[in-house]
Amino acid sequence: KIGIFGDELYMNDLGADTKGGGKSSAAADKVVEEIRAKGGKAVANYDSVEDGEKLIQTALDTFGRIGVYYICTAMLWLSELILISNLIQRVHLRGSFLVTRAAWNHMKNQKFGRIIMTASAAGIYGNFGQANYSAAKLGRKYNIHCNTIAPVAGSRLTETVMPPDLVASLKPEYVAPLVLWLCHDQCQENGGLFEVGAGWIGKLRWERSQGDIVRQKNQPMNPEAVRDQWEKICDFTDATKPTNIQESLQSIVSVLSRVESEGEVGANPTAAAASATSTSGINPAVGQKLPPSTFSFNHTQCILYALGVGMSTKDPDHLRFLYEGHPDFSCLPTFGVIPSQAAMMDGGLSSVPGLNIDFTQVLHGEQYLELYKPLPTSGQLTSEATIADVLDKGSGAVILLDVNTYSGNELVCYNQFSVFVVGAGGFGGKRTSEKAKAPLPPPQRAPDAVVIDSTTRDQAALYRLSGDWNPLHIDPSFAAMGGFKAPILHGLCSFGFAARHVLKQFADNDPSRFKAIKVRFVKPVMPGQSLQTEMWKEGNRIHIQCKVKETDAVVLSGAYVDLHAASGASPENLPQSELVFAEIGRRIKDLGSELVKKVNAVFSWEITKDGKNSAQWTIDLKNGSGSLHKGPYNGKADVTFAVSDEDFMEVVQGKLNPQKAFFSGKLKVRGNIMLSQKLEVILKDYAKL
């Protein structure tokens, strides 16, 4: 229908049905009668909006002028783009244009006019099945003072798609006041777009990202450059809100000036913000600590996690992880990622100076987890996180986040999150770090074991209850914004599947055998797909690769699980250094306070055996009454030693001079090397084998 307002009202309505068929004067006549009954002046018209000149001429003949008109053409056909109806476009788009064109000169000559167009949420946001309707409603014209409303109200149109009680509640009276104000000569609004309904009014506006320059002076622009900067192009952080063509063109002119004067594109702003380096070349974020987080839990969280990574009562071996009354009730080892991820989930990274990153561009790249003792099934854990390093990978930046998790003062587990920030590379930083736990390729032979396990359609919905609430894993609209056809499975859920496959295949589901796991996340998994874990045994290290069985796509690569030797293993296979550190621990308990006064230092040990990392130990003779624990120090050690188990024993027993070991490369030392002299107090005077 079209309402044209002058000093009186001119009502046009063909009286067609919601699909544009039929014709009746009843609808227009009813409105005219209501207005006349209240003392107003009104006239009805039944011409098509495509006869815009006739509509305007009838109004001029009746009232003598055109001051304001409100266009609300409505017809609803569900159709995809390929089925766009010519009638829809004739009525909505062409009809609005023709009526506007017919009225334009009259308004121009009298130097006054108000035009109100009507859109809808389908036109503003898009809606499947309404491509024709959306295109028509978004095709408004800016004439004189021209504004557009997207009303939600009960009408002949909406009663076909809304419940009767909702139609009755969404009264047209809750829309009309906005139209009246936009028609008033005191209203200076122009080019506005408003949603209105149920007594609420909201204004919408166009928004534009900062974008990015993807060409260099005297160089051809290519699609690869567009691809590489696509995330930045679509990043709406610090978006602008242009309101006219001048503001739109201003940025283009600025780009031309920058390219011509600078000769090439500089480092992108995201990279500068995410990875600003100091004059020393070291990112100021490195070494920064995040606020500590606490995690309280009981057997419920342990069981929920086990279910989230695919355990089921249909497998009797799983009951020890699913039933708190089981005599061997245990927590799955990979549950160790859950208390530590609070540093990521709670936005702790945003508090780090020198690390201003766009969290919409953050991806989980790799994960390393090491346990120092089996996880408890209840209690409170405290996690302390540190930025270990920031790397420049070109297309993005990698942030290494080390998280130590404690039960009281005892270190329970260590996680390293490798976080990839899309579009934040190119800042000139280093590409690799000795602090990174590197992924390893599997052996070049057929796997020793393969396990295929199906995920369920609700796997992500279940896993998210363990603490990762990202809507990407459950909300289809968020998944679509991320470029996915449907919500995807959490990477750490696949991580849990693969780890328990190894635990069952090579450790008889004994969580005490689990030592560490490292994975690289490659591609997403869709809930309902099957995971195929391929495993290669190399001593106590199990190399793994995980694929989606249906597509053969690799989803976890460079992965491995380290296991402790079975309890029946011969003592000669165990690191001999374990005996020395056990003795040191006993001496510290007896004489810790005296040792702290003499030494006042923290020593960290990295022990290898057969060329592989075997253990880390921390001897703290600086704080309190001293302590010894297995694992890295929660902070910066004064001295760090790296040595093989065999050479360590040679030094301790006096068979190898420490200086000779150092100069021959057998003993590596980092930190305050002079403090190493105080080790004699520990190793010689107090540690008796």
Image: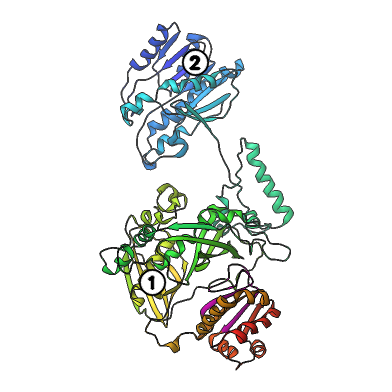
User: Reading the chain from its start, which is encountered first: label 1 or label 2?
Assistant: 2
- For the N terminus, which image quadrant? top left
Q: Which numbered tag is attached to residue 613?
A: none
Question: Does residue 155 appear anywhere in the picture?
Answer: no
* Nearer to the camera, 589 or 103: 589
User: At 55% from the left edge and 88% from the top edge, which residue is drawn?
Assistant: 649
How far across and down, in percent of the image, does residue 426 sit? 63, 62
Contact flag, marks 1 and 2 (Cβ < 8 Å): no
Question: Of the numbered discs in the image, which one, if any, rests on residue 5?
Answer: 2
Query: Mark on residue 511?
Result: 1
Of the pair 368 and 490, the residue shown nearer to us: 368
Q: Residues in magenta?
A: 614-643
Residue lying at 57% horizontally and 41% vertically, measured from the top left: 207
- Residue 63 visible from this viewpoint: yes
Circle 1 SS class: helix
Is 383 rendered above or below residue 601? above
Compared to residue 351, the image places residue 388 above or below, namely below
Q: Is residue 218 magenta?
A: no
The type of residue carrying mark 2 is Phe
